[in-house]
Image (cartoon, rainbow, N blue to C red):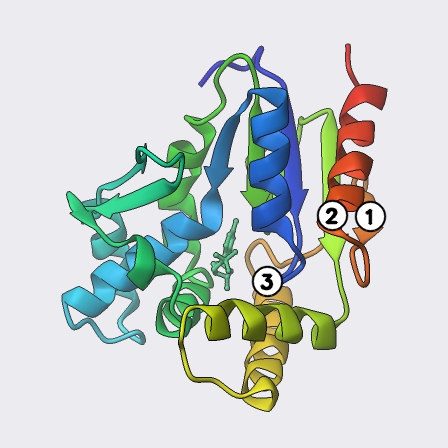
């Protein structure tokens, strides 16, 4: 970690556009990118591979320590995620991995075990950190914080389109129910619940084209530069 490196935190619920926006903004700024959700998802996938019970907190904490997660860019500039050396990029994006990640993310020891791994991404020339508690817990001293929101219906519709494009069979209603359940779980957990940092700029992305959101986020960065 390099505490001199500037950090832009981008937090928000699933489907708020965080991932897409964070990647584009990181690319435009030439900064590093941390997809913190991928770390929780990776533990979820590794727990699935090991056939662990999602109610067995002790086993999940051990699994967190034992799971090596690496991010690599492939030839097309796509970020691949390797779990214990195996490419698990596609498996990471499944609803099963998301649900496992959400359950695992409620365990305080898992969150604590992942803290330093996340802070290690803070390197010059800067870091865009995407997640739920980037501005509140992991990088509370970041000078630039954004909280993205969007209506649950729009988030479900975005996810529906993404999954349909991939040929995954889902229903819009089912996705909306899952999103609402995950929001409630992420916002009500005792440790690091999903909430905006007090000094975060909130941007509602409902109905906004990606480019407009990117422009607003870059504006936050330029206003707090220096
Ligand atoms: O952003 P995502 O959908 O990839 O995140 C997957 C799950 O991980 C989500 O349900 C909440 C959890 N998570 C978290 O608790 N803290 C983070 N910083 C990132 C993700």
Q: Nearer the viewer, residue 211 or 86?
A: 211
In which quadrant of the rendered image does the N terminus lie?
A: top left
Vertical placement of residue 110 versus 215, above or below? below
Q: Earlier in the sequence, mark 3 or mark 2?
A: 3
Vertical placement of residue 111 versus 100, above or below? above
The local secondary structure at tag 3 comes to loop
Give the Cα separation between the discs numbered 3 and 2: 12 Å
Vertical placement of residue 28 versus 196, above or below? above
Q: Nearer the viewer, residue 170 or 184?
A: 170
Q: Would you say 141 lies left or right of 190 here?
A: right
Q: Toward which corner of the image does residue 108 lie, by quadrant?
A: bottom left
Cβ of mark 2 under 8 A from ligand 1: no
Cβ of mark 3 under 8 A from ligand 1: yes
The local secondary structure at tag 1 comes to strand
Can you give x and y, in whole percent of width and height, for residue 25 in the image?
64, 33
**Location of mark 1 (residue):** 202
Give the Cα separation between the discs numbered 1 and 3: 15 Å
Q: Would you say 67 lies left or right of 21 here?
A: left
Judge the density around disc 3: few (<14), some (14-19), many (≥20) Cα neighbours within 10 Å.
Answer: many
Q: Earlier in the sequence, mark 2 or mark 1?
A: 2
In which quadrant of the rendered image does the C terminus lie?
A: top right
Can you give x and y, in whole percent of width and height, for residue 53 in the image?
24, 76
Q: Residue at x 55, y 25 (%)?
A: 127
The local secondary structure at tag 2 comes to strand
Which labelled disc corresponds to residue 14? 3
**Location of mark 2 (residue):** 147
Going by the picture, which residue comes out furthest to the right? Answer: 223
Q: Would you say 61 lies left or right of 207 here?
A: left
Q: Earlier in the sequence, mark 1 or mark 3?
A: 3
Give the Cα separation between the discs numbered 2 and 1: 5 Å
Judge the density around disc 1: few (<14), some (14-19), many (≥20) Cα neighbours within 10 Å.
Answer: some
């Amino acid at each position: 970690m390099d505490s001199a490196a500037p950090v832009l935190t981008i937090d928000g619920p699933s489907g708020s556009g965080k991932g897409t926006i964070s990647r584009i903004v990181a690319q435009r700024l030439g900064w590093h990118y941390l997809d913190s959700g991928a770390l929780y998802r990776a533990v979820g996938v590794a727990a699935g591979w090991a056939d662990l019970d999602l109610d067995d907190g002790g086993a999940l904490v051990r699994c967190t320590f034992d799971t090596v997660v690496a991010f690599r860019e492939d030839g097309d500039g796509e970020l691949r995620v390797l779990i214990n050396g195996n490419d698990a990029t596609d498996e990471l994006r499944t609803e099963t991995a998301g649900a496992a990640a959400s359950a695992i993310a409620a365990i305080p020891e898992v969150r604590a075990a992942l803290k330093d791994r996340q802070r290690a991404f803070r390197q010059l020339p800067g870091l865009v950190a995407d997640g739920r508690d980037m501005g509140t817990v992991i990088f509370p001293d970041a000078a630039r914080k954004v909280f993205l929101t969007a209506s649950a219906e729009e988030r479900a519709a975005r996810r529906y389109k993404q999954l349909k494009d991939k040929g995954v069979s889902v229903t819009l209603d089912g996705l909306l129910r899952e999103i609402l359940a995950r929001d409630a779980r992420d916002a009500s957990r005792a440790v690091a619940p999903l909430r905006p940092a007090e000094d975060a700029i909130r941007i509602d992305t409902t109905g906004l084209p990606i480019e407009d959101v990117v422009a607003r986020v870059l504006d936050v960065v330029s206003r707090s530069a220096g």
